[in-house]
Amino acid sequence: MSANSNISSHRVVKWFQDYADDIEAVNIHYVLTAGDEPPDWNHARATRYMPLVGRSIRMKELRLPLSISDAEGQPCSHYSLHYYFEVCQGGDRQYSPLYSEEVVTDSGDGLGGGVDHAGDEAERG
Amino acid sequence: MNPGRISWLGGGVDISQRWLAYRGDLEGPDLRLHYGFDGWQEPIQEVRLETVEPGLAVAEIDQLDGHIALDCAVGCGDDWDNNQGFDYRLWIGFDALDSHLHVSGGGAGALGIRSLGMAMASAGIVAGISSWIDNRALDRVDLTAARLFPLVWIRPGDTSISEVKRRLANGAVGLKLHPTVDDYPADDPRLDRYLEVAARLGCPVACHSAPGDADPDHIRRLAERFPETPVILYHTYLGPEEGRLRALEHALEQPNLYLETSWCRWQMVRRLIDGVGVDRIMFGSDASIDGPSHYHRQPPNVEGFETYNDGLLALVRSLDRATARKVMGDNARRLFSLNGNSHG
C-alpha cells in the first residue's frame, strides 16, 4: 500500500492481482473507525470497484477523509481502515479475509508520504 | 435435470383461454401441468400436457379471467420440473420485462446466466435490461438467447468513446452509470461526452441512485444538462424514504427523469406511480444479485418485508391492466426502443 494526503483527502492505494482467468469483477469494501470502535458494515460501508490497470492487476485509489469523528464527536486524524475484497468469479462471489490497518493523516505538511503496512501481501490474492 | 421453459403461445393476451407451451426435458404419456393462480392460491389444478413434438408439449388453460398470474410446475410420473425448486410463473395479460438486471458471465454461480434464467422464469420475466461492471464479461454470454438487452457500463475517464459507440452499434440499448462504486459524483462533467453520444443516438442513461455521489440531487443536475435524454434513477434511491420522495420531487420537476423500482416495496411503487404518472415508472429488480431465488427469497429481500413475487402480485392487482402493462414492461420497451411493445 502507498498513502499520501492532499488538501481535501488522504489517498490510499490498494492493489489486487487476479488469481484466475474467470474473475469477472473485484470490489473493495471498507469502513473507517476511530479508536477501538468495531466497524459498522451495515451503515458505514463504502464499496469501490477495482478496475484492471494491467493484465490481471487491479488498482483503486481510496480517497479517505483527513479526519473522522470519534465517539465523543472529536475529529480524529489517526483512525483504522477495515477492508476486504469481493471477488466475482464464475458467477459466484467470494470474499477475502478482513484486513485492518492504521491510517495517520496529520503529517503537518499535508503530505503523508509513502507508507507500508502489514497485510499488503494477503490482499494480492 | 435442466430447467425447462414455459411460455404462452401466440394469440391475444386478453382472452380467457390460452395455450401454454412447455419446452424441457420431461416427456411421456403422463406429462402434466400442476398449477395455481396468483401465488399458488387454492384450488391447485392439473391439466394434461400434450406432446406436439420432442421437447415441446402444450396445454390449454381456461378460467384465466379474474386472475393476474399463473404459477406452475411440470410433472411426469414421479418426476418433476419445478425450475430447480423455484417454480415457474406466467403473467396473464402482459409479458413482464425487468429493466434492471445483472449477469456477470456464463458461470454457474448466483450472478451467472443460468441463475438469472431460473430467477426470471420463477417471476414470469420474459426479457430484461442487463449490465455488468466490466463490459467485457457480457461479451462471453449469449444475451439474445437469454433475452437480455445490455447497457454499456461507463467509467468516466476510463471507458473510451469508441467503445461506447461500438457497443451501442452492436446491440447495447443504453448507458449505465454507477457513481458509488466507480467513485465520482453523478453530475461529474466528465460524463458529458458520454451523454452527448447517448443524446445523439437517442438512447437512455440508467444511473444507480443512493446516498452520496449517486444522490438524486446530482442525477438531476446531469439530467438538466441533457434534457432530451431519458435518465433513469435505478432503485429510485437505495436508501431511506426521504431520498425516495426527493427523487420523486425531482422527477416531477425534470421531465426526462424516470424512476425504476428495484428494492422498493409495492406500496412505494404505487406512491411513485400516483406521484409522477404511470408513463415514467418502470419495474426493475436488480436480479439476480440474490441468485436464482432472487424474486422470492426467504427471508424476504425487499426491505426485509416482502418478496418481489408477492409484492408484484399486490402491485399488479392494485392497478388497472393498462397501467400494469406499462409499469411491468411496456414503459421500458418504449424508452429503450425494444422492438415496439411486443418484444419478449
Image (cartoon, grey):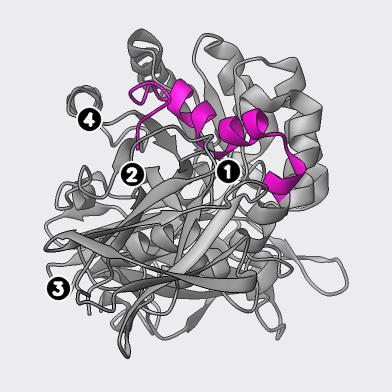
Please give left or right for residue B20 compared with residue B97 in the image: left
Residue B52, horizontal then vertical, whole percent: 18, 57
Crowd rating for badge 2 (residues with CA inside 10 Å; few <14, some 14–19, many 20+): some
Q: Residue B121's spot in the image, x, y percent?
A: 40, 60
The label number, if any, that marks residue A7 in the structure image: 1
Image mark 4: chain: B
Identified at 28% across, 49% down, the residue is B134
Mark nearer the viewer, 4 or 1? 4
Describe residue B289's horizontal placement relative to residue A42 as left or right: left
Looking at the image, is mark 4 or mark 2 earlier in the sequence? 2
Disc on res. B171: 4
What whole-number distance in Å separates the C-alpha atoms at marks 4 and 1?
Answer: 44 Å
Does residue A118 appear left or right of residue B258 in this picture? Answer: left
The residue under label 2 is B9
Q: Residues within 10 Å of mark 1 (few under 14, many from 20)?
A: few
**Quadrant of the rendered image containing residue B274:** top right
**Observer-nearest of B155 and A91:** A91
- Single out the mark in the foreground, 3 or 4: 4
Please tell me if label 4 and label 2 are on a single chain: yes
What type is the residue that disc 1 sits on?
Ile
Secondary element under disc 1, as helix, strand or loop, is loop
Region rendered in magenta: B315-344
Asked if residue B331 lies in the magenta stretch, the reply is yes
